[in-house]
Amino acid sequence: MSANAKEQILDFVRARYPQAEIDETQDIFALGFVNSLFAMELVMFIEKTFEVTIPNDELKIDNFRSAETMSELVDRLSPARV
Amino acid sequence: MTTQAEIAPGVLQVTDRKSARAFVDTHIVPYADAYDRQGRVPEELLERMTAAGLWAPFLPRDTGGGGMDLVTLGEVHEEVGRGCSSVRSLLTVHTMVSWAVQRWGSPAQREQWVPALGRGDVLAAFCLSEPGAGSDASGIASNVVEKNGGWVLNGVKKWITNGQRADLFLVFARTATSIGAFLVPRDTPGVEVTPIEDVLGTRASMIAEISFRDVALGPDALLGPSGFTAGMVLTGTLDLGRYSVATGSVGIIQAALEACAAYASRRTVGGSLLKDLPLIQAKLSDMVTDARAARLLVAEAGRLKDAGEASTIMATWVAKYFASTAAARHASEAVQIHGANGCGHDYPVARLYRDAKVMEIIEGSNEIQRITIAGQAEREII
Ligand SMILES: Cc1cc2nc3c(=O)[nH]c(=O)nc-3n(C[C@H](O)[C@H](O)[C@H](O)COP(=O)(O)OP(=O)(O)OC[C@H]3O[C@@H](n4cnc5c(N)ncnc54)[C@H](O)[C@@H]3O)c2cc1C
């Protein structure tokens, strides 16, 4: 599930920033292109795609640094799946 | 058994475009020019809007709201904007704050504010702009410091729609690390409201400058997360405001069109009705076309919001850019078609012209819209 989530998140980020070279552990904030518009889009994308609601206390920068940390967040918020 | 009184012929509550249209035609259209001249919307209309359930019908049903989808909300705001941009502006800022509290509030904040905002018992205003900062939100100087487990707010906010009347202010201010959003009831000591009169457009929207001097707030005043995601409270709230302004701009085009179609069918020059003159027909056809195009762009942005799609944010920028610039163009042409009558008080088009100009400035000026849209242009490569 999280490998798939990672890929979907990477696809989303790459589609927005085709010029950037991004892998799953890349700190996207370090690349300097994350603004509040993109941050909002990212949150909406994650909530919609993975059917989760991100509570305020999970809206921390460290959760959104990379595809890997975002997919870990998705795993934490998703109900256990069989 | 008690029955609810009709708020307009055949209408008990505003639940869709049709009922909004009936409400607006009954209670707003006949009086909009008077509101514009008086520089305020009377309490009586605010109360009627409360009775009609107009303030925040999109709030979830379990909070006492109507659960209205955002496409329908856009249609309702368009109808209100067709009647009076000042009234629509009051709805816009109230919508922004109500949504923000519902979306980002803690359970306690939601319980305290959402039902009252939904009913319209508490009216809200959105306070971002300052004497020294508008487009560039990062330039705001208002600040909060943490003290005794709460916050102390200082600063001045300017151009605040409904600032003269609102009961609750959502105030953006610098924290030690970023920008935060704070809920400030109007009656908090240190809050001072100074009306701004005689603005160019949306003259009845009861704009104010609000100063905050050593305003002591509890820990529960902070809305939403602090840190990097605090910017999202602002982005999300402005997105909804932009959507509402886009719908209101469609309403202005529609009002210009209706006024011009009626005038051109009556007024003769050189023995011809205006509507039969090719140059006037060209203007009317452009109004019809742009009204439809703008409405579709707005509906698409609303549909994406209802679906929770991230692409709604850009769709809303595009809709607002198109609708506001088209509104300014067509309101100007509407004055032109009315000739001298367009410059006087007997027709609504002078008001539409002044109001439309404001739409190009608020919720992201034209220039900021173009910069943002161009900045994302590569997304359009399909
Ligand atoms: C009727 C009315 C109601 C309002 N209601 C509210 C409200 O309820 N709450 C609130 O917080 N604010 C409100 N505002 C303020 C509004 O949001 C600001 O006016 C708007 O954000 C623009 O900011 P500014 O006026 O400071 O212009 P500035 O930011 O000073 O910009 C001046 C000009 O420069 C242009 N510009 C700015 N940056 C750039 C750039 N990078 N490149 C090129 N051009 C640029 C702008 O487009 C504009 O044309 C209201 C304003 C009006 C007129």
Image: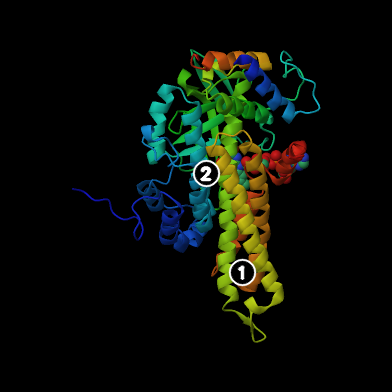
The 10 Å Cα crowd at callout 2, few under 14, some 14 to 19, many 20 or more, is: many
Q: Position of residue B64 (x, y in %)?
A: 36, 36
**Residue type, mark 2 in image:** Thr
Q: Which mark is residue B92?
A: 2
Q: Residue at x 61, y 69 (%)?
A: B342
Q: Distance between the residues labelled 2 and 1?
A: 28 Å
Q: Is B231 left, or right, of B218 in this rendering? A: right
Give SS at disc 2: helix
Q: Where is residue B276 in the image (x, y as percent from the top left)?
A: 65, 79
Give SS at disc 1: helix
Q: Residue furthest bottom?
A: B271
* Any part of residue B182 in sight: yes
Q: Position of residue B256 (x, y in %)?
A: 59, 63
Q: Which residue is drawn at 68% across and 37% down?
A: B135
Q: Which residue lies furthest to the front in this view?
A: A82
Disc 1 target residue: B342
